[in-house]
Image: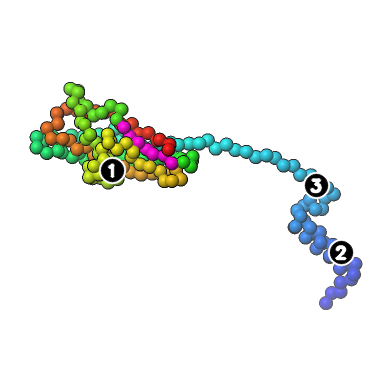
Amino acid sequence: MALITTSSRTRVYRIIIAAAAVFMLGPSALSASSTTKTFPVSVTIKPELSLEVNLETGSTMDFGTVLSSNTEPRLSKSIRMDIRVFSNMGSVYEVTHQWVNPLANDSGAQLQDALYFGPSTDAVSTEQTVSLSPVVISSNSRGESLTESVYYQLNVPASQSAGSYEGTLLLTIVPQ
């Protein structure tokens, strides 16, 4: 068994106290004086509300060839549109669609109220046409980013004039 003398004990206590001071107060506890400096910190986060749209058919909403009938309407295939909205603004928004140029052929005949949309491949069953229902999707109450798929489908009226029909559909994010 080792004997610890009073002077050794005092030295051990001083080492323990110094170690505790460094541990609790940091290395500056051993120095004669310390200096602190504060710096303001700032950042600006740019508000962003952006829209990305991807069609399963590429860059054109191409319904292919649809046969018309003199007795009943004909449905096109459905086309899926994936819509991604990024928002860091924290406010409600809607994504709308509208015709810039309605579907028309070279003779000027138009497909009036024939483009339907909805959350499933049977878009016609929603009875929502682009002309009558401008809102495609709405954000939640916090205006968070979202990704949703919407399906578009043509309902070609009976006896629709033949031809290649083209138009332009515009999607827009509208802050509320």
Name the residue carrying label 2.
Answer: 11
x, y percent for residue 42? 62, 38
Q: Indicate which label's residue lies in the foreground, 3 or 2.
A: 3
Residue appearing at x 81%, y 61% in the figure: 17
Q: Nearer the viewer, residue 135 or 149?
A: 135
Q: Which mark is residue 118?
A: 1
Task: Classify the position of the C terminus by image quarter.
Answer: top left
x, y percent for residue 104? 22, 27
Query: Magenta region: which residues?
Result: 92-98
The amino acid type found where label 3 is placed reads Ser
Instruction: Mark 3 or mark 1: name the one nearer the start of the chain.
Output: 3
Task: Classify the position of the N terminus by image quarter.
Answer: bottom right
In the image, taking residue 15 as reference, residue 109 lies left or right, namely left
Give the class, few, some or many, for how many residues have Cα within 10 Å of label 1's Cα (few <14, many ≥20): many
Q: Are marks 2 and 1 in contact (CB under 8 Å)?
A: no
Q: Main secondary structure of the magenta part?
A: strand
Instruction: Mark 2 or mark 1: name the one nearer the start of the chain.
Output: 2
Above or below, 36 against 171 in this view is: below
In the image, taking residue 5 as reference, residue 60 lies left or right, namely left
Give the class, few, some or many, for how many residues have Cα within 10 Å of label 3's Cα (few <14, many ≥20): few
Residue appearing at x 33%, y 43% in the figure: 149
Name the residue carrying label 3.
Answer: 34
Instruction: Mark 3 or mark 2: name the one nearer the start of the chain.
Output: 2
x, y percent for residue 68? 13, 34
